[in-house]
């Protein structure tokens, strides 16, 4: 899979939400990202565990490096001032298998407006149609029904429960697995 469209000037998919746009991440996005990721309401049902802004600067640097196995991330940004309001991208890429795991987050003041669903659908379809993926999957902590709804509204299908799939703050937790495949697109 070619990650250059994430990192260069190729057009990104339209978000479909007035006032917001997808753009490439910048290192200076880290403080805005951290401002909402340090909110327990945002991370309660996720595996995020951050010690500070420096953790996100390191993640952004890794994303910008463009390694074939990821991660890669895009900013969901305010059109007016360019400020990061959320992110979406891939945590894990298995190019040999045409598969990637999508991940997203959004500032809480933008929740329940369809923004995450629009971003998820746009990026997943773009990856399947333009980047050569055959499967975009997502794992969701079993206690996160809001994220399950985001995926279902984006056309993803729930495939099953992964028991003790990932440690979350030191505890093995169950995750739902969802997928959207190239066969499911019109």
Image: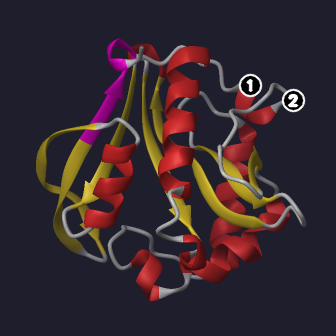
Q: Which residues are magenta?
A: 178-184
- Local SS, label 1: helix
Q: Any magenta on residue 84?
A: no
- Local SS, label 2: loop
**In this rendering, position of residue 151 left or right of residue 66:** left
**In this rendering, position of residue 161 left or right of residue 90:** left
Which disc is residue 111 wearing?
none
- The residue at which mark 2 appears reads as 9
Q: CA distance from mark 1 to mark 2?
A: 9 Å
Q: Residue at x 73, y 40 (%)?
A: 65
Q: Residue at x 37, y 67 (%)?
A: 47
- The answer to which quarter of the image holds residue 143 is bottom left
Residue 178 pos. (x, y %): 27, 40
Camera sees residue 100? yes
Q: Nearer the viewer, mark 1 or mark 2?
A: 2
Q: Is residue 162 above or below residue 100?
A: below
Q: Is residue 186 above or below residue 59?
A: above
Q: Residue at x 59, y 27 (%)?
A: 68
**In this rendering, position of residue 153 left or right of residue 11:** left
Camera sees residue 89? no
Residue 144 pos. (x, y %): 27, 67
**In this rendering, position of residue 167 left or right of residue 19:** left
Q: Is residue 77 above or below residue 73?
A: below
Name the quadrant of the C terminus. top left
Residue 46 pos. (x, y %): 36, 68
Q: Residue at x 57, y 43 (%)?
A: 71
Q: Any magenta on residue 182?
A: yes
- The residue at which mark 1 appears reads as 4
Name the quadrant of the N terminus. top right
- The answer to which quarter of the image holds residue 41 is bottom left
């Amino acid at each position: 899979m070619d990650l250059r469209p994430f990192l260069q000037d190729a057009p990104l998919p339209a978000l479909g939400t007035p006032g917001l746009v997808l753009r490439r991440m910048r290192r200076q996005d880290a403080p805005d990202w951290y401002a909402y990721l340090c909110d327990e309401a945002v991370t309660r049902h996720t595996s995020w565990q951050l010690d500070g802004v420096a953790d996100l600067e390191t993640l952004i640097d890794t994303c910008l490096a463009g390694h074939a196995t990821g991660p890669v991330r895009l900013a969901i940004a305010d059109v007016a001032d360019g400020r990061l309001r959320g992110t979406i991208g891939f945590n894990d890429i298995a190019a040999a298998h045409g598969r990637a795991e999508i991940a997203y987050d959004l500032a809480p003041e933008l929740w329940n407006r369809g923004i995450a669903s629009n971003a998820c659908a746009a990026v997943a379809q773009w990856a399947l149609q333009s980047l050569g993926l055959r499967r975009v999957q997502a794992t969701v902590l079993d206690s996160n029904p809001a994220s399950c709804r985001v995926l279902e509204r984006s056309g993803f299908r729930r495939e099953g429960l992964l028991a003790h799939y990932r440690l979350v703050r030191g505890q093995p937790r169950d995750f739902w697995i969802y997928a959207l495949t190239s066969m499911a697109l019109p």
